[in-house]
């Protein structure tokens, strides 16, 4: 599994601030050129050369934008996209393909892509489309559903009816990671990488699962025996406050 990656610089609090891009492209020269362009734009880029690697990265790491080729080895691009969407992958996707007739574009959009650009392409247009997808992602990612409640990322609050429950920054990061892919089971090591990149001991995951359950009810995080955790449901009601 070959992955080429760069890493973001931390902000003052130690958290990554750069836009993360998943690029799945099997043509080595094109992949290197695109990755270089994206990095010049300030993006952090993970490059996968086949569909299996792209699927693994999409399911285990958090991205702001994804760029997928269609003609991939191992797992074809639209099949990869469909598998990601079925697993709760909500990152906006641009399909970049030599297949550019209207029927091909329709197939890409129907498979779950937000945008479709045919090869050969204009570099400035590609970068502009990525910026547009990133803005769209920021607009839609400010709140995430958690069962019948919602997690407001800007205020770090879970809203259920008229009840608002404040979360710490780490609690919010953990719940947001689970809520972004509500059907996926995350291992402790995956959650450590995604939600607590500055931590080393996976015990921190269990600690913050406990904190979330104490504030929002035991069912907010479901334990899948032998595998890890996934999103559950919030037990807070407007007339009773947080469940201990």
Image (tube, rainbow, N blue to C red):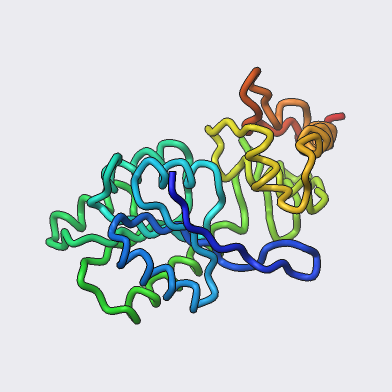
Left or right of 43, for residue 200 = right
Toward which corner of the image does residue 16 lie, by quadrant?
bottom right
Q: Residue furthest bottom?
A: 124
Where's the C terminus, which quadrant?
top right
Q: Residue furthest top?
A: 225
Q: How many marks?
A: 0
Measured along the vertical axis of the image, is residue 138 above or below residue 146?
Answer: below
Is residue 139 visible from the viewing direction of this image? no
Measured along the vertical axis of the image, is residue 131 above or below residue 154?
Answer: below
Where's the N terminus, which quadrant?
top left
Q: Nearer the viewer, residue 210 or 144?
A: 210
Toward which corner of the image does residue 219 lie, by quadrant?
top right
| Residue at image location 62% in from the left, 58% down from the top | 142
| Residue at image location 71% in from the left, 51% down from the top | 197
Residue 67 position, x and y percent, is: 38, 59
Measured along the vertical axis of the image, is residue 237 above or below residue 51?
Answer: above
Measured along the vertical axis of the image, is residue 93 above or below residue 1?
Answer: below
Residue 76 position, x and y percent, is: 26, 44
């Amino acid at each position: 599994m070959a992955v080429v990656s760069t890493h973001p610089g931390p902000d003052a609090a130690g958290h990554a601030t750069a836009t993360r891009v998943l690029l799945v492209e099997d043509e080595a020269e094109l992949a290197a050129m695109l990755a270089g362009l994206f990095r010049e734009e300030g993006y952090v880029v993970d490059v996968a050369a086949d569909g299996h690697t792209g699927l693994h990265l999409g399911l285990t790491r958090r991205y702001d934008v994804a760029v997928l080729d269609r003609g991939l080895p191992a797992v074809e691009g639209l099949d990869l996209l469909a598998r990601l969407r079925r697993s709760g992958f909500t990152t906006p996707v641009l399909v970049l393909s030599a297949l550019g007739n209207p029927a091909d574009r329709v197939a890409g959009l129907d498979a779950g892509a937000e945008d479709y650009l045919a090869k050969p392409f204009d570099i400035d247009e590609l970068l502009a489309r990525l910026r547009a997808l990133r803005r769209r992602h920021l607009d839609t990612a400010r709140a995430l559903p958690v069962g019948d409640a919602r997690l407001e990322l800007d205020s770090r609050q879970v809203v259920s009816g008229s009840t608002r429950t404040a979360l710490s920054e780490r609690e919010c990061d953990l719940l947001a990671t689970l809520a972004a892919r509500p059907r996926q089971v995350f291992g402790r090591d995956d959650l450590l990488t995604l939600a607590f990149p500055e931590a080393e001991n996976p015990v921190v995951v269990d600690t913050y699962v406990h904190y979330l359950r104490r504030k929002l009810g035991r069912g907010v995080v479901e334990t899948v025996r032998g595998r890890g955790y996934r999103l559950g449901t919030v037990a807070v009601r407007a007339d009773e406050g947080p469940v201990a």
